[in-house]
Image: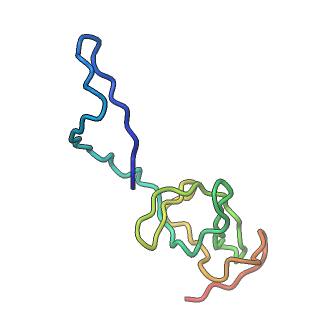
Amino acid sequence: GTVRVSLVPADDAPRPPVGVLGTAHVRAGKSRQAPTVPRAALRGSGGETDVILCGADGVAHVKPVRRGADAGDRVEATGLTAGDRVVVEPILGVADGEHIEVEK
């Protein structure tokens, strides 16, 4: 991807002329350690994203999540706890509180 950066020179440093090219070395941050889910488990787009959790009680629970970084066929989903079980298929038409059957 593309990242826009602004360089602010120190007060006493001369400003480089417009159009001068340079090289930057960027150190990427560490992972936020957010759980990841299969991309197919996400419902919605933009700011309105959720997943369906498989409750131990055999009931579907809709859980809002914040979509994070893509990692291949998986996506970070902030708002989940490691070990949460998510529905992958079908995700459309499943309502919160609906009884579901988990295939193993």
Instruction: Kindly give the residue lying farthest to the bottom in the view shown.
Output: 103
Q: Residue at x 72, y 81 (%)?
A: 100
3 relative to 98 in the view: left or right: left
Q: Is residue 31 above or below residue 45?
A: above
Quadrant of residue 25 within the rendered picture: top left
Q: Residue at x 63, y 57 (%)?
A: 46
Is residue 3 or residue 83 the one in the foreground?
3
Residue 73 spot, x, y in % from top left = 45, 73
89 relative to 6 in the view: left or right: right
Q: Residue at x 75, y 76 (%)?
A: 94
Residue 79 spot, x, y in % from top left = 58, 54
Q: Is residue 76 above or below residue 59?
A: above
Quadrant of residue 42 within the rendered picture: bottom right
Q: Is residue 73 above or below residue 23?
A: below
Q: Which quadrant does the C terminus fall into?
A: bottom right
Q: Residue at x 39, y 46 (%)?
A: 3
Looking at the image, what colour scheme do you see?
rainbow
Residue 44 spot, x, y in % from top left = 67, 65
Q: Which quadrant does the N terminus fall into?
A: bottom left
Is residue 92 or residue 62 the one in the foreground?
92
Instruction: Kindly give the residue lying farthest to the top in the view shown.
Output: 12
